[in-house]
Image (cartoon, helix red, strand yellow):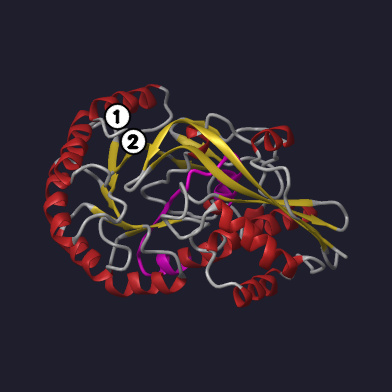
Amino acid sequence: MNEIRIEAVDTVIIDLPLRREQRFSVLGTSKQSIVIILIRSSDGAVGIGEATPPCGPWWGGESVESIKVQIDTYLAPLLVGQDAFGLDELMHCMHRVVYGNHFAKAAIEMALLDLIGKVLQQPVYNLLGGKVRESLPMSWPLATGDPDLEIAEAEEKLDQRLHRMFKLKMGALPVEEDVSRACKVALALEGRASVRVDPNAMWDESTAMRAIARLQDAGIELIEQPLSRWDYDGASRLAQRFRTEIMLDEGLCTMQDMFRIAACRAGGTVSLKIMKSGGIRATRAIADVASASGTSLYMGTFLESSYGTAANMQLCATFRDLPFGGELAGPLLLAEDICQQPAEYRDFELWLSDGVGMAAAIDEDKLNAFRRDRRYSVHVVA
């Protein structure tokens, strides 16, 4: 086979309800909005991608509305008529025409890799060097703000053998209240579960010094992005002072960020996310630099659907060492999903699905039921 000619690019915004409100440091949401990208080849094969900004543009500057506009107006016209096998050149063209917009580009690359995998009858992990793992130990987000409710929620997850790692979302409450809440949860679960916290870059360095001292004494295992995303030097000082692991998330989006983190030892662990870094292959390259510098890897999430979660697992399957696991828990938080088969969670882990491409299939009835607007753009060969 010499080429896969791209014939059409469709974009669809969907809104999926959550089982409960998910709180972040600056806001909360009861739904997850997603852009689904469908790239059709001239022989009828369809590659699917997903862009899932967390609760609007506050995290990375992109929203589902901006992602759709960027793809429809600027990126899709670059793809139509081109060979999907020329993935490097297509990504180069998109970077040259549109700055940033990592979520939009990641979703397009995801769809192209899915298309290539389907045509070659290979899972995407084989396009990345092959798999070395079948599953991922799974963390669960605790985000109600009420420690008693969160302890009960964690106990239920332990009983169901779904999770024995828990991460508290912080930053929405006053620091003293947040820290006391986390300590109470950690002490209640001591010896039975790992507890981590995520202030979402809401602390300054002096606040972090005081808070982490208490959190460390309570047995908190990991602190995710305590300082502003740009404060690598401050994160380095925290990492040197405390034995509790410091993990960077917002501070790692690009390869250049990873070089800076490695140079100043800003954290012992980094959270990998396909969307924030512009695609699966870019994230794989960042992971290689992290591993070469002695920095541990973690699989983060933007609360993707079962489809986006399957894509994350294709990448995750290529990572040998993930000492703190990951948190690809989006499908468990969704009250409705869009895949024919949901993601498989059992024995405290998420399991890799069998199949070609992303090894996940969209339920078209569900897609139509939750799409925001039936009037959408389709770019086709003239």
Q: Which amino acid, by three-letter code, is at mark 2?
A: Leu
Q: Is residue 70 magenta?
A: no
Label 1 to label 2: alpha-carbon separation: 6 Å
The reply to whether callout 1 and callout 2 are in contact (CB within 8 Å) is: yes
Image quadrant of residue 113? bottom right
Residues drawn in magenta: 288-314
Q: Tell me the residue at 73%/32% (across/down).
A: 365
- Rate crowding at label 2 as few (under 14), some (14 to 19) or many (20 or more) other CA atoms within 10 Å: many
From the image, tell me which residue sits under label 1.
150
From the image, tell me which residue sits under label 2.
142
> Considering the numbered disc 1 on the image, is that residue within a helix, a strand or a loop?
helix
Whether residue 190 is visible? no
Q: Is residue 292 magenta?
A: yes
Across and down, in percent, residue 184 comes to 18, 33
Residues 143 and 244: in front is 143
- Rate crowding at label 1 as few (under 14), some (14 to 19) or many (20 or more) other CA atoms within 10 Å: many
Vertical position of residue 377 compared to residue 158: above or below: below
The quadrant in which the N terminus is found is: bottom right
Whether residue 168 is visible? yes
> Considering the numbered disc 2 on the image, is that residue within a helix, a strand or a loop?
strand
Q: Tell me the residue at 58%/46% (across/down).
A: 34
Residues 301 and 73: in front is 73
Q: Left or right: 49 with respect to 335?
A: right
The quadrant in which the C terminus is found is: bottom right
Query: Which of the marked residues, 1 or 2, is nearer the chain's N terminus?
Result: 2
Q: Residue furthest bottom?
A: 96
Q: Which amino acid, by three-letter code, is at mark 1?
A: Glu
Residues 194 and 275: in front is 275
Q: Tell me the residue at 16%/39% (across/down).
A: 177
Q: Left or right: 110 with respect to 195?
A: right
Across and down, in percent, residue 145 comes to 27, 34
